[in-house]
Image: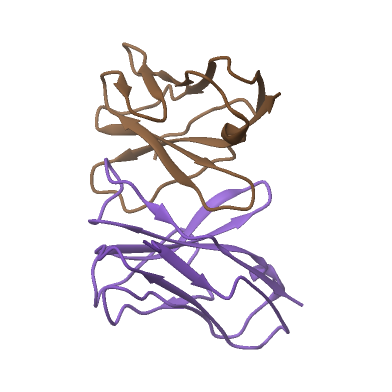
Amino acid sequence: DAKTTQPNSMESNEEEPVHLPCNHSTISGTDYIHWYRQLPSQGPEYVIHGLTSNVNNRMASLAIAEDRKSSTLILHRATLRDAAVYYCILSSTGANNLFFGTGTRLTVIP
Amino acid sequence: IAGITQAPTSQTLAAGRRMTLRCTQDMRHNAMYWYRQDLGLGLRLIHYSNTAGTTGKGEVPDGYSVSRANTDDFPLTLASAVPSQTSVYFCASSASPGVVGREQFFGPGTRLTVL
């Protein structure tokens, strides 16, 4: 599976937008981009996924670069509950495994 | 809706003992997974099951076994626990096999300490 690179940590003020970057320069044409997050002392939870086009759902937006070598998870208004570790994961069709890296620890400042 | 339940919440046991971690889901999902999470290493897949009656090895299967007798239950067994198996264990499920475009739902985890 292709590797992703994320910053170890980021900070955001409450109620401000947050842009979480992910680099995946070795992504293949069949790799999907998934984002999961893990709140303290909980299991991971799905946030969003996409292939080529930008995606929006009730939790977040996913912006995918035209060359697909990077993507950005956008939280439109950070809340204290959004403080978590965010994982950017690539997976190909047929894969059975989500390869979690170390993710980005987001701190939300009141 | 309970989703995925795991038991026990936490457990400490002596090395060499046998231990079974339980996982039950009520979503009628076909696929189930066991991950372990160690500090600084993210989550790693131990075993998976695409449907009842089938299992497969993940990234770190050694020292663990699983069974899938029915859709709802996916127990993970450590036949003879060793200290390196100290970790937080997460069970997950998805409606169908494969991870692409399929949301995985995770349980609350079991914190296991092997002395």
Q: Is B81 placed left or right of A69 in the picture?
A: right
Image location (x, y in percent) of residue A10: 65, 23
When asked about the image quadrant of residue A34, the answer is top left
Residue found 33% across the figure and 33% down from its top:
A49
* Residue furthest to the bottom: B17
- What colour do you see for chain B? purple
A17, B62: nearer the viewer = A17
Residue A11 lies in what quarter of the image?
top right
Whole-percent x, y for residue B114 in the image = 71, 76
Q: Residue at coordinates 36% horizontally, 27% vertically from top-left?
A: A27
Q: Residue at x 25, y 56 (%)?
A: B95
Q: Is residue A88 above or below residue A46?
A: above
Marks counted in the figure total 0
- Residue A90 rendering spot, x and y as whole percentages: 38, 36
The image quadrant where one finds the N terminus of chain B is: bottom left
Q: Quadrant of the C terminus of chain B?
A: bottom right
Q: State the colouring used for the structure image.
A: by chain
Position of B1 with respect to B37 (left or right) is left
Residue farthest toward the top in the current orientation of the protein: A66
Residue A88 horizontal/vertical position (percent): 47, 33
Residue at 68% from the left image edge and 68% from the top image edge: B86
Q: Colour of chain A?
A: brown
Q: Is residue B29 above or below residue B105?
A: below
Q: Is residue B12 above or below residue B99?
A: below
Q: In terms of depth relative to the viewer, which is nearer, A92 or B4?
A: B4
